[in-house]
Amino acid sequence: NDVPSNTPPRFRFNPERVHVVPVNALSAAEKGEEKEKEKEEDERLHYVVVGGGKTGQDTILHLLTEKHVAPENIMWIVPNDFWITARDPPDGKMDTCTEFLALANATTQASISSPEYIQTTFEELERRGKVYRFDQTVRPTKFMNATLNKEEVGIIQTLVKKNSGGSINRSGRLAAIEDDGTLVFASGERQALPWSAAGDGGGVLETTTFVHCSCGAFNFSASADEVRPPVFGEGVVS
């Protein structure tokens, strides 16, 4: 499957101007594997995490708890909000999809083809402590079975809270980063980095690291072009 270390970002950027790293580069610098990179990272005060899935969630945790980056120095680009599977023992974990379906059939009158069939069930699971969301004001639209415990969710919520100074950006998928740091989204919307407004001026890119967490764990780019036999053939199932 695709991981940031072997799958390049889909968004466009000029590597001569814009500092983009895969998520594993953050820990590589801390372990002393690349001393020059470590020094360079120490001089970068701001982080833009691109991707809202499990890799992005773990990156936010790492920045807040291991690198001790202040929330106001982090922007998190989250195209979709996710329901998060609880990882709290002994009974907080949702065991199987069968449990989800059994609960859905027991708690909602909505048609199985209706979005409410799914959402009402997730909200009931949330009341039972089986799933979490980062922002109570936003109804998640995705579920990829990413798992976190209650403490980890609480740490990430320090970034999401309005008064934290941090920034969660729900403008959609990032299409490009321009040479001056302007973010261009797939919708065509353009936004300046939040630190530009704080008076960084032309030096904003010199203090910003963009962390690539956006390849999608369920994509398989390396094998997408492989020729595969049909599943059902004459007298054979492959």
Image (cartoon, helix red, strand yellow):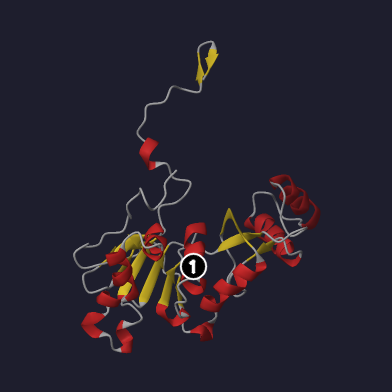
**Picture layout, residue 2 above or below residue 82:** above
Numbered-mark total: 1
Viewer-proximal residue among 27 and 184: 27
Identify which residue, 208 or 85, lies in the foreground.
Answer: 208
Q: Which residue is mark 1?
A: 62
- Residue name at image x 47 percent, y 76 percent: 68
Q: Nearer the viewer, residue 208 or 76?
A: 208
In the image, is residue 66 above or below residue 103?
below
Q: Position of residue 184 (x, y in %)?
A: 30, 67
Farthest-out residue, top? 235
Whether residue 191 is visible, yes or no, is: no
**Looking at the image, residue 100 lies above or below residue 14:** above
**Left or right: residue 26 compared with residue 43:** right
Which quadrant would the N terminus be assigned to in this image? top left
Provide residue 160's location: percent of width, then percent of height.
Answer: 53, 76
Residue furthest to the right:
106
- Which quarter of the figure has residue 22? bottom left
Residue 100 in view in this figure: yes
Percent of width and height locating residue 170: 45, 69
